[in-house]
């Protein structure tokens, strides 16, 4: 497995991990470890996957241990984006036992959550592998963790939608109401944005598509349409814009959506509701 596109910069990891450790340590630190474990006690431990999944977040886990104690020895045993089976070890850590224990929960929280996102993404990606459709995340992310969750989507074989409001224009239903129509909203956008900025328009009816296209929309989002309606929309658009499907898409329905001919399928729940992958840290006796 090759390294995922756009690896996480250390400068980003430092801030996110520091905030998580501060939340966990509070003002008193790790009372249990400091009281029950000798200061010179050493430990060798491994993080193990306990159910099948796709690994993501190893650099974040490593950063958690290093932030607590730079003297710890760490070795990643697989790459982010790798498939793992129950019992597979993904990270080894050795050094001061207190330090390992103090960083344990923060490291596991990040690794379990991000691996869960990658695992659910991979499930959808595999389900549409026979089509041209790409699985894509949204801005429905955990506050403060967007960059990490979008990285996890990439580890699962998916792609990213906008990272923020400044990445591009997405004209949704409320924008259309406020602008008094699709044509007016798209025309205003096209007149003011640079040539590098994409314009996407959300439609929930077939009769809205032509207005979006005539104004120069680059992407048409089909919101909560069934596959038969999507087929009609793809035929009407006829390659004049990228076609994105969104809304209430599940593992059971994603293949039918992809088979309609859309280019992109955006799914919010892979970041905001993905179940955590069960991972644990075990000390060697």
Image (spheres, grey):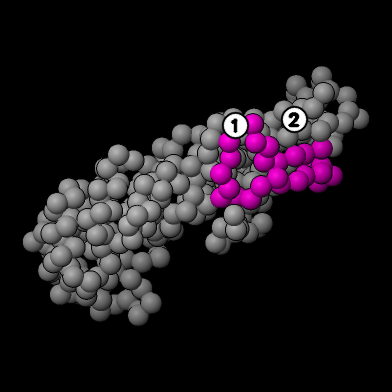
For the record, the magenta segment spans 66-94
Q: Position of residue 173 (x, y in %)?
A: 19, 55
Q: Secondary structure at mark 1?
A: loop
Residue 149 seen: no
Would you say 279 lies left or right of 170 here? Answer: right
The correct choice, above or below, for 282 with respect to 146 in the image is: above
Q: Toward the viewer: 38 or 123?
A: 123
Around disc 2, counting alpha carbons within 10 Å, would you say few (fewer than 14), some (14 to 19), or many (20 or more)? Answer: many
Please tell me the numbered disc located at residue 101.
2
Name the residue carrying label 1.
Answer: 86
Residue 5 seen: yes
Q: Position of residue 258 (x, y in %)?
A: 28, 53
The correct choice, above or below, for 85 with respect to 238 in the image is: above
Residue furthest to the front in view is 130
Q: Residue at x 48, y 42 (%)?
A: 119
Around disc 1, counting alpha carbons within 10 Å, would you say few (fewer than 14), some (14 to 19), or many (20 or more)? Answer: few
Inter-mark Cα distance, 1 to 2: 22 Å
Q: Toward the viewer: 192 or 33?
A: 33
Would you say 253 lies left or right of 177 here? Answer: right
As for residue 81 lying within the magenta part, the answer is yes
Residue furthest to the left in view is 207
Q: Residue at x 54, y 61 (%)?
A: 5
Q: Residue at x 38, y 77 (%)?
A: 196
In which quadrant of the rendered image does the C terminus lie? top right
């Amino acid at each position: 497995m090759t390294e995922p596109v756009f690896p996480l910069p250390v400068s980003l990891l430092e801030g996110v991990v520091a905030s998580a450790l501060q939340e966990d340590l509070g003002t008193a630190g790790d009372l249990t470890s400091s009281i029950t474990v000798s200061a010179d006690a050493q430990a060798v431990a491994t993080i193990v996957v306990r159910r099948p999944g796709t690994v993501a977040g190893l650099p974040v886990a490593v950063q958690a241990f290093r932030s607590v104690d730079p003297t710890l020895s760490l070795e990643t045993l697989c790459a982010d984006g790798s498939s793992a089976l129950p019992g597979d070890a993904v990270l080894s850590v050795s050094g001061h036992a207190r330090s390992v224990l103090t960083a344990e929960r923060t490291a596991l929280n990040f690794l379990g959550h991000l691996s869960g996102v990658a695992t659910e993404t991979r499930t959808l990606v595999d389900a549409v592998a026979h089509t041209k459709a790409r699985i894509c995340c949204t801005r429905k992310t955990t506050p403060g963790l967007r960059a990490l969750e979008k990285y996890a989507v990439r580890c699962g074989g998916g792609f990213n939608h906008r990272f923020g409001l400044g990445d591009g224009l997405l004209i949704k239903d409320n924008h259309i109401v406020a602008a008094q129509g699709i044509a007016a909203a798209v025309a205003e956008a096209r007149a003011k944005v640079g040539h590098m900025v994409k314009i996407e328009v959300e439609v929930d009816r077939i009769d809205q598509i032509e207005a979006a296209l005539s104004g120069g929309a680059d992407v048409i989002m089909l919101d909560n349409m069934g596959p038969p309606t999507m087929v009609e929309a793809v035929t009407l658009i006829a390659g004049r814009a990228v076609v994105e499907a969104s809304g209430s898409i599940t593992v059971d329905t994603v293949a039918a959506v992809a088979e309609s001919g859309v280019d992109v399928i955006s799914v919010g729940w892979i970041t905001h509701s993905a179940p955590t992958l069960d991972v644990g840290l075990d000390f060697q006796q």
